[in-house]
Amino acid sequence: NIVGLDWNGKEKQLYAMQHGRDQLHEFYPEMYDDKQSAELPAEEMFLVKKGSNFGWPYCYYDEFQSKKILNPEYGGDSKKQGRCAGVDQPIMAFPGHWAPNALLFYTGTQFPERYRNGAFICFHGSWNRAPLPQAGYNIAFVPFKNGKASNKYEIFADGFAGVAEIK
């Protein structure tokens, strides 16, 4: 479920952001509790190359186990990798259900130098992180250096969640 997609002109590479799946606990309560379902799967950022295989629809990324896990629909048990063991890994993972909607590599000059060629990712936030608080109504920034994503993202802007008033 790729929603954010952008070409990094400096690196001449394609990157993508994927929405993870939903409702692991609701469909498979014998394998996932409410908290696991709220946290999993991670939202994934990919470097897309010719021949890439990210495991769809068979696999999801478990950020706690740091690996791709076989979806229960295909024989997974929340731990088994199976056919997912050899698929391409994300270059970065974000908390589950943040729901990335857009990806943009910054090429401007208004922001400080450290932002140049970094990735901004807009998330629309969760609807199903219960029993945890809903989250992800933000814009994250991923610094890139020498063509590689840093191992950490930072929240660039936050506080977009709120109660909409309809008049």
Image (tube, rainbow, N blue to C red):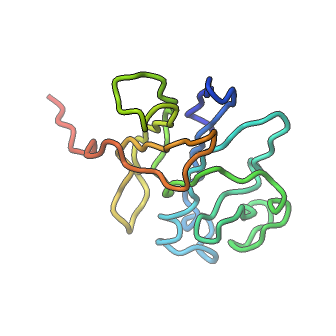
Q: Nearer the viewer, residue 109 or 105?
A: 109
Label count reads 0
Q: Residue furthest left?
A: 167
Q: Residue furthest bottom?
A: 30
Image coords of residue 163 (percent x, y): 21, 44
Image coords of residue 73 (percent x, y): 74, 60
Q: Image point 46% across, 51% down: which residue? A: 153
Image coords of residue 76 (percent x, y): 76, 68
Q: Image point 83% across, 33% down: which residue? A: 50
Q: Quadrant of the N terminus?
A: top right
Q: Image point 66% across, 51% down: which residue? A: 90
Image coords of residue 133 (percent x, y): 33, 62
> Horizontally, is 138 left or right of 79 in the view?
left
Q: Nearer the viewer, residue 92 or 76?
A: 92
Q: Image point 65% across, 59% down: which residue? A: 61
Asked where in the image residue 2 lies, by quadrant, the reply is: top right
- Vertical placement of residue 150 versus 77, above or below: above
Q: Quadrant of the C terminus?
A: top left
Q: Nearer the viewer, residue 84 or 66?
A: 66
Q: Nearer the viewer, residue 80 or 90?
A: 90
> Horizontally, is 4 left or right of 91 in the view?
left
